[in-house]
Image (spheres, rainbow, N blue to C red):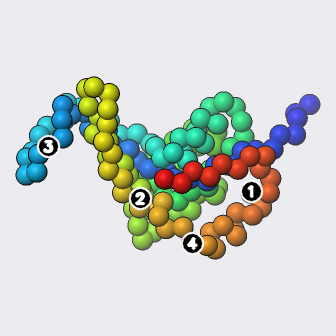
Amino acid sequence: MERNRKKITVLGSANLDTFLFVDRMPDIGETISADNMVTSCGGKGANQAVTIGKLGYDCDFVGQVGNDSAGKTIVEEMRKYNVNVDSIKIISHVPTGQAFVFSFKNKNNSIILSGGANTEWKENNFSELSESLAKSMIINIIIE
């Protein structure tokens, strides 16, 4: 007999993260080379939703991405980890949020964030979510 579980809903950011592994930040006007580069899905909200899905819980993610390859990648990756992406809104006039992470050998980092679709929330977006939120046991809102 399947137990009647309520789901967890996470409302937050979804980004495509680009990690640049460098020895140091460049000086103004200077060009340096990265030792390596890795691109992955990120955003505090999306990361939490994926973790919840990996733990086997029913999870809905509420967020916004652009109508671009980064947005499509994020949605596809979240589906792989059993996250319901039906409440992700595709915003056509802005790109998906991106983070550029300068990662240093001493394990510190510096981040430049371009909010993109994450910054396009309108008040009426939330009224569309009332049914999904009413079915949730926990609602986690992550604002960056």
Query: What's under tag 2, amino acid-wise?
Result: Gly
Of circles 1 and 3, which is in front?
3
The furthest residue to the right: 1
Element at badge 3? loop
Q: Could you tell me which quadrant the N terminus lies in?
A: top right
Query: Where is mark 1, residue-wise?
Result: 133
Is 74 rendered above or below residue 126? above
Q: Residues within 10 Å of mark 4 (few under 14, many from 20)?
A: few
Query: What's under tag 4, amino acid-wise?
Result: Lys
Q: CA distance from mark 4 to mark 3?
A: 38 Å
Element at badge 4? loop
Q: Residues within 10 Å of mark 1 (few under 14, many from 20)?
A: some
Query: What's under tag 1, amino acid-wise?
Result: Leu
Q: Earlier in the sequence, mark 4 or mark 1?
A: 4
Mark linked to residue 122: 4
Q: Earlier in the sequence, mark 1 or mark 3?
A: 3
Query: Where is mark 2, residue-wise?
Result: 115
Element at badge 1? helix
Q: CA distance from mark 4 to mark 1?
A: 17 Å
Say left or right for 28 vs 112.
Answer: left
Of circles 4 and 3, which is in front?
3
Q: Position of residue 62 (x, y in %)?
A: 61, 55
Q: Are marks 4 and 2 in contact (CB under 8 Å)?
A: no
Q: CA distance from mark 4 to mark 2?
A: 15 Å
Q: CA distance from mark 2 to mark 3?
A: 23 Å
